[in-house]
Image (cartoon, helix red, strand yellow):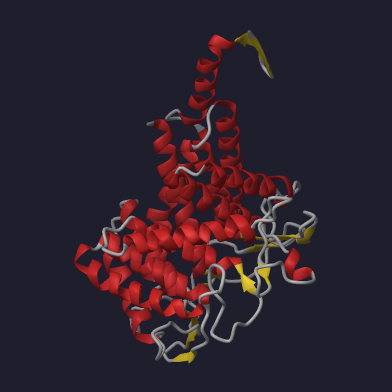
Amino acid sequence: MTLNMHNGTFDMETAPNYLNSVTALFLSNDSILSSKSLTLSTWLTESAFPLWWNEGADHLNGGFFETIALNGHIFRGNRRFRVQPRQVYSYNISEQLEWNGPAAVAQQHGMRYLLTHYRCADGSFGALANDTGELIDSTFDLYNQAFALLAFACRARSAPDEREAMATEAARLRELLQGLRHGEMGFNENHDHKLPLCSNPHMHIFEACLAWEEVEVADAPVWRALADEIATLALTRFIDARSGGLREFFDADWRPMPGIAGRIMEPGHQFEWAWLLASWGRRRGRPDAIVAARRLFDIGMQHGICPRRQVARMQLLDDFSVHDDVARLWPQAEWIKAAVLLAVLSEGEERARYLRDTEAGVDALNRFLNEVPVAGLWRDKMRADGSWVEEAAPASSFYHIVCAIVELSDRLAELKG
């Protein structure tokens, strides 16, 4: 039996060797993708990690600044809670990438600040502190609690002497969230049951649960069960049964919100959920989750990438028409994570295709990283015409960048065996 391929006809018996050679082309030591991965890791360890610790950390008052100007100057001002746990996460990953700077000190610096300055009376974490560390907005945000859980998992994993304390913090916060339980699955946004319900904070709680599964703690089965619940919610409610696309906003019964809000689908979140569902599906032996992840990724690639700029745009509607053509940095990072994991879960020509998609995502991310005057900073927003919004580099993006780079490095190493 023969197969017709784009480069010729060959016997079926030779197909495995051919398909293995396709993968080898992308994964050899001198391959373009491997080289680009190494360049990104070097950018992190030699430029980004030192800059965001030396300049982006407030060494006088504690915590991390919100932004660094593109000329390297610091903007002192109010700080969102989410920046602190995201920087803890980033410097936790710096240990894995063997940064030779004070990774543990940086994590403790951020953790101490978030626990001291953002804690509310009920044990949750508020939204905003001023430059002196005074909590000026104690509004409850489910999204922020998710990142607290992730930061606790990071410290528990890397610092055995802090594991019990971090597990206690996480369990306390998880118990507090029980008061927000939705009657079906998942969580309400707050105690007032304010609408819309949102898929995005659930995505990050899901991420935190998967991180806690990797930590040796007594309540690991509880984290596992919560991860399974959120995965089920995504597969049955967040993802549209007809199109396979994932929506953002829902009414009180987990139905799409009326109007435009209920129609919004973000390419970056198609990628991010694809990565998480593929990770979960791999752990649980759930091929249906991996099929759903592939569809989410395909939607992001087919409809979410601007063909002229070759970057992932912000928003589509549920008919896959463009709703917001601005391109932000973070979807490019999520593109890389999903593509390279799906490559690991594929074989032959399909794997090669995902690796090409991975390389395209790396190229897109590099546009945001390279067009700055100070190495270690980044652009955040590209307009529809390809021009940049002139603004400081937001610290909150570092989490996305770091996660993409370490996922790329790890999955390429896995493919090389």
Relative to residue 140, is residue 377 depicted above or below?
above
Residue drawn at the location 52% of the way across and 42% of the way down:
340
Decide if residue 179 is on the left or right side of residue 352: left
* Residue 310 drawn at (x, y percent): 69, 47
Residue drawn at the location 45% of the way across and 70% of the way down:
147
* Residue 366 drawn at (x, y percent): 56, 50
Q: Quadrant location of the C terminus?
A: top left
Residue that extends furthest to the front in the rendered view of this protein: 183
Residue drawn at the location 38% of the way across and 85% of the way down:
123
Q: Is residue 233 visible?
A: yes
Residue drawn at the location 65% of the way across and 79% of the way down:
195
Q: Quadrant location of the N terminus?
A: top right
* Residue 240 drawn at (x, y percent): 69, 56
Decide if residue 82 is on the left or right side of residue 273: left
Q: Where, by quadrant of the figure, is residue 22 drawn?
A: top right
Residues 196 and 46: in front is 196
